[in-house]
Amino acid sequence: MPKLSVVVPCFNEEEVLAELYRRVTAICQTTVGQEYEIVLIDDGSQDNTWPLIVRLCESDPHMVGIRLSRNHGHQLALSAGLSITRGERVFIIDADLQDPPELLPRMMELMDAGADVVYGRRAQRAGETWFKKISAALFYRVLNHLTDAPIPVDTGDFRLISRRIVELLNGMPENHRFIRGMISWLGFHQVALEYDRQERLAGTSKYPWRAMIRFALDAITGFSIRPLRMAMALGVGFGVIAMLGILYSLHSWMVGRVVPGWTSVMVAVMVLGSAQLLTIGVIGEYIGRLYVETKKRPLFLIDKIVRQSCEAPPKNP
């Protein structure tokens, strides 16, 4: 069993793979000598990412390449990598090198001191727009307000985790995965390491707005039922308003102050209709996720696993 496994999800990362390999290999050798493995997961890339991964695996026995059957998304690609790691400790990092792998020695020191999880907390976020910074900060604060298990703010998946955290994480079966939240939910001794996030080395972000919204929904619905309670409270609130409106209408009719018209009726219908649709939408989101979970499909499908001089059979959940 190697001392360290490095897990790197990759999607269309041909421009950064060479530099990623150089920097991660150098810091692994400095930190643990030759007792490491680097697991690169190709999440359905459409460029030369997979041929480059195969080439690296053929030239270096420390490299492991995983090719998924299609694009499953970052969180499931990361889950696939975690499922085959063998290291006593697992270092999670993105391929874009915005999170510097050179922080590994400091993370190892904190874990030597007793931590089960050492997560990176961003002090500065270089190369990101003001809107991205504000929306990210707001997202984590809203999420912590909604969830019972606190999730550290200004963090990503960049972290070092112990073997027992990996095993517990692999045993969690949900399809809509928010891994940083799942690790926080596990508890144990978790320590933050502040750092300045760097600009992306090359290429573009793999999180467009639609993916970010889906990611936020996974986070909120996966760790909180408060939106359901808020929808119920909203329904009760508008029910009270509707009752007051009925009483007012009856009073106006009794004293003869009724004025024919449709404005008040349309306003009432639109307000109450909007509240009903919002409530049904929140409930539907949870029911849809329950439907997906009950099918118990595999989280991901592995097409190939490549190591030096051999091609291992896929290990699918």
Image (cartoon, rainbow, N blue to C red):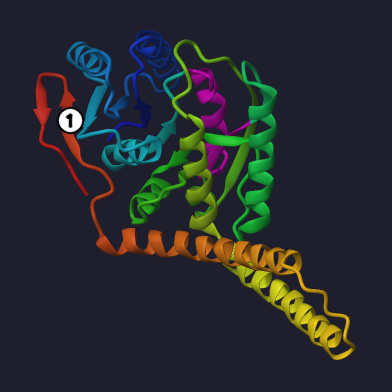
List x then y, in percent, for residue 301.
Answer: 21, 41
Would residue 107 be counted in the magenta stretch? yes
Residue toward you, 207 or 184 = 207
The structure residue drawn at horizontal position 70% and vertical position 72%, both measured from the top left corner, is 238
Residue toward you, 32 or 231 = 231
Q: Is residue 243 visible?
A: yes
Type of residue at label 1?
Answer: Ile
Where, by quadrant of the figure, is residue 21 drawn?
top left
List x then y, in percent, for residue 38.
Answer: 32, 24
The structure residue drawn at horizontal position 65% and vertical position 62%, both measured from the top left corner, is 270
Location of residue 22 with respect to 80 vertically, above or below: above
Q: Is residue 159 visible?
A: no
Where, by quadrant of the figure, is residue 72 drawn?
top left
List x then y, in percent, for residue 267.
Answer: 72, 63
For disc 1, the marked residue is 305
The structure residue drawn at horizontal position 39% and vertical position 53%, both measured from the top left corner, is 168
Q: What span is in magenta?
A: 97-121
Residue toward you, 161 or 41 = 41
The structure residue drawn at horizontal position 64% and vertical position 57%, both measured from the top left corner, is 146
Circle 1 — which element?
A: strand
Going by the image, does 286 lie left or right of 149?
left
Number of on-image labels = 1
